[in-house]
Image (cartoon, rainbow, N blue to C red):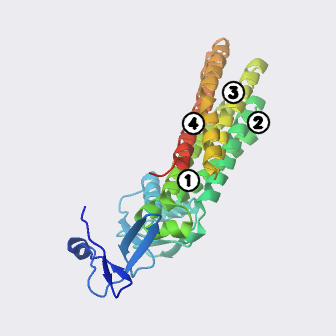
């Protein structure tokens, strides 16, 4: 850390010198333009970039299937606005994989294809992406998925189970978008101003979005189990339904706390959510006892996985409550 003394020039203008090493490393010299970003009592300075859009390239020779899909996701989440996928020869399979991966990402489109490269571009700027709306939508979809997955299991409704599985793509799409905005805000202080939230809030939203994405994954897991097994007995159905209702209240209340503007109310809601966790753990143990008495060991094992997913859902809600408490805490 270096310190500088503030000077006054012209009787009314405050000036401060820049560290030479930093200026040299960032190509700042006499006549360069820099940007200032105010965050309460902090003033951030960065060189003004001549490039309006961040562009990145990646070699994809030999990359196929999941590896190539992961490369697309990684470049998108990293915050590149233009992404070049280059190879000595881009195969038809690689093109298909890139296009399919692009369809699952908000704002990303194929803008150029040649024999040696495929170019993607993000057609939305950060100011058009609402992290608040995204996480609110994730909450609605993921928790509805969980409820529908249990309903599909208890009512042996394969059509509803398939619908739950398909909705997981919507949650993943929103999760990648939130992660992209988060990394953009970390890298570019101006992005936080455009988005309208402090970077700490974006961090809390991103952390909570991760928990909602996991809840959606467990809903998908339950839906797949529903497709594999037949109807369950009435006594098991009743306790599983009760457990699902209790478990989902934790992330619901925790999300209320996260999105609450009043700090005192947010703390009260987050504390309420966390206080429900011991009761849900006890309920889960009681349901496990009922399942162990079943005559069908394979059915009991499958239903045990459902209980585990519901219990984890409550735990993820507890994690959201922790983020809400951090968001509501006073700044030092």
Q: Is residue 316 left or right of residue 75?
A: right
Label 3 crowd (10 A; few <14 / some 14-19 / many >=20):
many
Q: Is residue 39 left or right of residue 253?
A: left
Q: Which residue is mark 3?
A: 243
Q: How far apart are labels 1 and 2 at the CA level?
A: 28 Å
Label 2 crowd (10 A; few <14 / some 14-19 / many >=20):
some
Q: How far apart are labels 4 and 2 at the CA level?
A: 30 Å
Q: Nearer the viewer, mark 1 or mark 2?
A: 1
Q: Which residue is mark 2?
A: 157
Q: How far apart are labels 3 and 1 at the CA level?
A: 26 Å
Q: Secondary structure at mark 3?
A: helix
Q: Earlier in the sequence, mark 1 or mark 4?
A: 1
Q: Earlier in the sequence, mark 4 or mark 2?
A: 2
Disc 3 to disc 2: CB gap under 8 Å: no
Nearer the observer, 180 or 16: 16
Q: Nearer the viewer, mark 4 or mark 2?
A: 4
The percent coordinates of residue 141 (x first, y second) are 68, 48
Label 1 crowd (10 A; few <14 / some 14-19 / many >=20):
many
Nearer the observer, 259 or 119: 259
Q: Which residue is mark 1?
A: 175
Q: Earlier in the sequence, mark 3 or mark 4?
A: 3
The residue at the point 65 percent across, 50 percent down is 260
Measured along the vertical axis of the image, is residue 186 above or below residue 55?
above
The percent coordinates of residue 326 (x first, y second) are 51, 45
Q: Secondary structure at mark 4?
A: helix
């Amino acid at each position: 850390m270096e310190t500088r003394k503030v000077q006054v020039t012209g009787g009314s203008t405050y000036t401060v010198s820049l560290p030479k090493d930093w200026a040299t490393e960032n190509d700042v010299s006499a006549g360069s333009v820099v940007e200032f970003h105010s965050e309460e009592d902090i003033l951030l300075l960065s060189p003004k970039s001549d490039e309006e859009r961040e562009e990145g390239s990646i070699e994809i020779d030999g990359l196929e299937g999941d590896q190539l899909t992961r490369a697309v996701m990684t470049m998108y989440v990293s915050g590149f606005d233009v992404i070049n996928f280059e190879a000595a020869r881009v195969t038809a399979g690689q093109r298909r994989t890139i296009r399919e991966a692009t369809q699952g990402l908000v704002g990303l489109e194929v803008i150029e294809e040649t024999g040696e490269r495929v170019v993607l571009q993000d057609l939305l700027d950060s100011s058009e992406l609402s992290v608040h709306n995204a996480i609110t939508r994730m909450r609605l979809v993921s928790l509805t998925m969980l409820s529908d997955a249990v309903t599909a299991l208890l009512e042996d409704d394969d059509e509803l189970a398939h619908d739950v599985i398909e909705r997981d793509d919507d949650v993943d799409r929103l999760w990648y978008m939130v992660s992209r905005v988060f990394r953009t805000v970390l890298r570019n202080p101006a992005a936080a101003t455009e988005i309208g939230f402090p970077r700490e809030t974006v961090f809390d939203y991103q952390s909570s979005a991760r928990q909602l994405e996991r809840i959606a994954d467990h809903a998908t897991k339950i839906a797949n189990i529903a497709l594999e097994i037949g109807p369950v007995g009435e006594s098991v159905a009743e306790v599983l339904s009760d457990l699902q209702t209790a478990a989902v209240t934790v992330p619901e209340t925790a999300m209320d706390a996260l999105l609450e503007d009043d700090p005192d109310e947010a703390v009260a809601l987050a504390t309420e959510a966390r206080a429900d966790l011991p009761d849900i753990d006890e309920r889960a143990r009681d349901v496990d006892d009922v399942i162990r008495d079943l005559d069908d060991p394979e059915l009991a094992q499958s239903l045990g996985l459902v209980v585990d997913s519901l219990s984890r859902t409550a735990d993820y809600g507890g994690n959201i409550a922790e983020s809400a408490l951090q968001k509501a805490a006073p700044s030092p």
